[in-house]
Amino acid sequence: MTEPESGTQLDGAGAAIGGQIRRMREARGMSAAELARQSGISKATLSTLESGAGNPRIDTLSAIAVALRLPLGDLIVATAPTHAVIRPGTGEPEYSKQELLQRVGAGASVEIWRIRIRRAGNRIDSPAHSVGTVEHLHLASGGLRVGAVDAPTEVTAGDFVVFGADVPHFYEATTDNVEAVLVMTYPVTVW
């Protein structure tokens, strides 16, 4: 991988990794100059990465992880989706079926919630969570409108949806007796 032109802001993985490097460095009480020295990279490169304007090579990430005394995977964090990602429910298997719904990377705290809404039209509103929070919802029964207030999506029993929860969002029953499992992930900021 090559470094982008100076001043270029990357979306997605590069920005998320840069933010994670900065959070982990600060959590260790380490200055940028000290991390650069211990990892053997230039201060300019480290600054570019931490600002989200870099596209780090794996050997650079490895050197930083060693200097921070972390597994490499702890620097690679998932980014919040810019819009809801829906994985529709699938049919019954003939014998058995195993389906990956979502992978949660290292460097994230995880909470698992059970959501139950008794009547159609009932709604749970949620304020924005911390930056980088992602919600992964599997709808076990019923129907639900869910997601960002300005871009909700409808899901039915068996569907799985992933959305960024660092904006105001909600869960509104479109049928009676809604039951869902929600997995909330958010970046670890303190060690």
Image (spheres, helix red, strand yellow):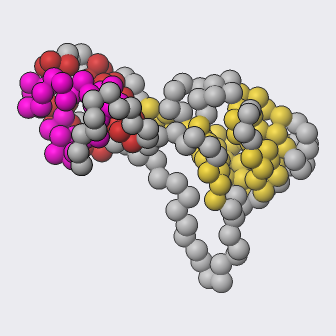
Quadrant in the rendering for residue 5: top left
Q: Which range is magenta?
A: 36-64
Q: Compared with residue 107, is residue 144 higher up or lower down, i.e. above or below?
A: below
Residue 48 shows in the view: yes
Judged left or right of residue 127, residue 125 is: right
Determine the residue positioned at 20% across, 16% down: 31
Residue 184 shows in the view: no
Judged left or right of residue 21, residue 151 is: right
Judged left or right of residue 16, residue 171 is: right
User: How many numbered dots are placed on residues in this image?
Assistant: 0
| Residue 90 sits inside the magenta stretch | no
| Residue 78 percent across, percent down from the top left | 44, 43
Determine the residue positioned at 24% across, 40% down: 3
Determine the residue positioned at 54% across, 24% down: 130
Q: Report the predominant secondary structure element of the magenta stretch.
A: helix
Determine the residue positioned at 65% across, 83% down: 94
| Residue 43 sits inside the magenta stretch | yes
Quadrant (top left, top right, bottom left, bottom right) of the C terminus: top left
Quadrant in the rendering for residue 61: top left
Q: Compared with residue 11, is residue 27 higher up or lower down, i.e. above or below?
A: above
Q: Which residue sits furthest front?
A: 5
Q: Compared with residue 37, is residue 66 higher up or lower down, i.e. above or below?
A: below
| Residue 158 percent across, percent down from the top left | 72, 61
Quadrant in the rendering for residue 77: top left
